Image: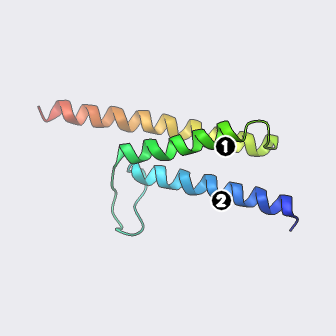
């Protein structure tokens, strides 16, 4: 594996790590430690913000494939976040 291939793999792993964390924090997938669905939208927003920061700080330094992968992950997470935020607001209205 060349150094460039290693860096591409590491970047993909980093992006996937934050993606998985955000999905867990939004309650989209189980937390493997507790084996339960948990929702912490504040933490999910932090994970998405980290990916936004990575996207901003690496702009112009990624291959087109890396850039597209990161952009797609961020877009997907933001759409899911809005969906979960809407669910949370609906739940709050129903309990009033």
From the top left corner, tell me how far across and down residue 32 is, in percent.
Answer: 42, 67
Residue picked out by circle 1: 70
* Disc ID at residue 31: none
Q: CA distance from mark 2 to mark 1?
A: 11 Å
**Colour approach in the figure:** rainbow
Residue 79 lies left or right of residue 9; in this view the side is left
From the top left corner, tell me how far across and down residue 81 is, in percent.
Answer: 44, 38
Residue located 79% across and 63% down the image: 6
The quadrant the C terminus occupies is top left
Above-or-below relation of 9 to 60: below
From the top left corner, tell me how far across and down residue 92 is, in percent.
Answer: 20, 34
Residue in the foreground of this view, choosing between 7 and 36: 7
Residue picked out by circle 2: 13
Residue located 25% across and 32% down the image: 90
Assess disc 1: are there few (<14), some (14-19) or many (≥20) residues with their C-alpha within 10 Å of its C-alpha. many
Residue 62, quarter of the rendered image: top right
Residue in the foreground of this view, choosing between 8 and 85: 8
The quadrant the N terminus occupies is bottom right
Residue in the foreground of this view, choosing between 10 and 19: 10
Assess disc 2: are there few (<14), some (14-19) or many (≥20) residues with their C-alpha within 10 Å of its C-alpha. few
From the top left corner, tell me how far across and down residue 77 is, in percent.
Answer: 52, 41
């Amino acid at each position: 594996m060349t150094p460039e291939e290693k860096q591409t793999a590491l970047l993909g792993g980093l992006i996937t790590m934050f993606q998985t964390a955000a999905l867990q924090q939004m309650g989209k997938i189980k937390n493997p430690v507790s084996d339960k669905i948990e929702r912490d939208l504040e933490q999910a927003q932090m994970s998405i913000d980290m990916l936004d920061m990575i996207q901003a700080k690496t702009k112009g330094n990624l291959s087109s494939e890396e850039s597209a992968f990161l952009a797609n992950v961020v877009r997907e997470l933001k759409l899911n976040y809005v969906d979960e935020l809407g669910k949370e607001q609906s739940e709050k209205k129903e309990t009033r």
